[in-house]
Image (cartoon, rainbow, N blue to C red):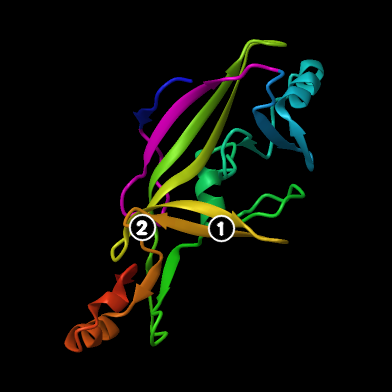
Amino acid sequence: MSGPRVVKSKLGTEQASPPEVVERKIPIVLGRYQVRVKNQGRDIYLEDFLREALKTRNLIFSRFYLMDEHPWGLHFAPTLEQAIDWFRGRKLPRDGYLSISWGQYLTYICGFCEDKNTEPLQVTKVEKVVLIGDFPFPWEIDGWRVSEIETEKMGKGNPSKIIGLHKTYPIIKWHTNKDKYICQRCADRFKEIGREEKMAGYAIF
């Protein structure tokens, strides 16, 4: 597996600046079942997808995901534009598989008074993966996904997901390792009474 390299990207209309695109190439060894592909409503291994492509020479897919990511990572879209659209909740694929999205804004809810604040969610980094192989014919498959976001209050984080009993939920793993929020008013109140320890693990907004 080769190391990452940075390439230029196109800019979405809601972005203040273009996201960085980090590209890596993954050589695929058939028989190791490294990738699952969504194709015509089916969820199949890349091996089966390529066997069918041997007849049609058609490498069109709706998305794929890497089997060796634990926990399983986000799906890859066929284009950069689709990756950002799906992240925002636009033009979600209708391929028989439920989709998750993060939208354009993030709402913080104070864990003490339940006051709320909303701010824009910026995409700062996109991952491009190029799957490559030479059997049953030389081929390359590109996939894209949003890998880093940023807000003014929380800084940078990585979009991820948690899988519940019947549903998958989009989450953000912040670089600060804080996943709870407290408003400035409540934070000031705890400081006034000398209870700063109550704010441990909370991000202030």
Residue at 17 percent of width and 88 percent of height: 192
Residue at 40 percent of width and 70 percent of height: 180
Mark 1 = which residue? 101
Indicate the position of residue 73 as horizontal and vertical percent values: 56, 43
- Label number found at residue 153: none
Tell me the amino acid under the disc marked 2. Asn
Tell me the amino acid under the disc marked 1. Ser
Q: Which secondary structure type mostly characterizes the magenta part of the structure?
A: loop
Disc on the earlier residue, 1 or 2: 1
- Figure quadrant of residue 182: bottom left
Residue at 55 percent of width and 38 percent of height: 79
Indicate the position of residue 25 as horizontal and vertical percent values: 49, 23
- Residue 205 seen in this snapshot: no
- 135 vs 149, left or right, is right
Magenta stretch containing residue 19, yes or no?
Answer: yes
For marks 1 and 2, give the CA distance: 21 Å
- 167 vs 124, left or right, is right
Indicate the position of residue 58 as horizontal and vertical percent values: 73, 24
**13 or 183, which lies in front?**
183
Mark 2 = which residue? 177
Residue at 55 percent of width and 54 percent of height: 161
Q: Which residues are magenta?
A: 8-30
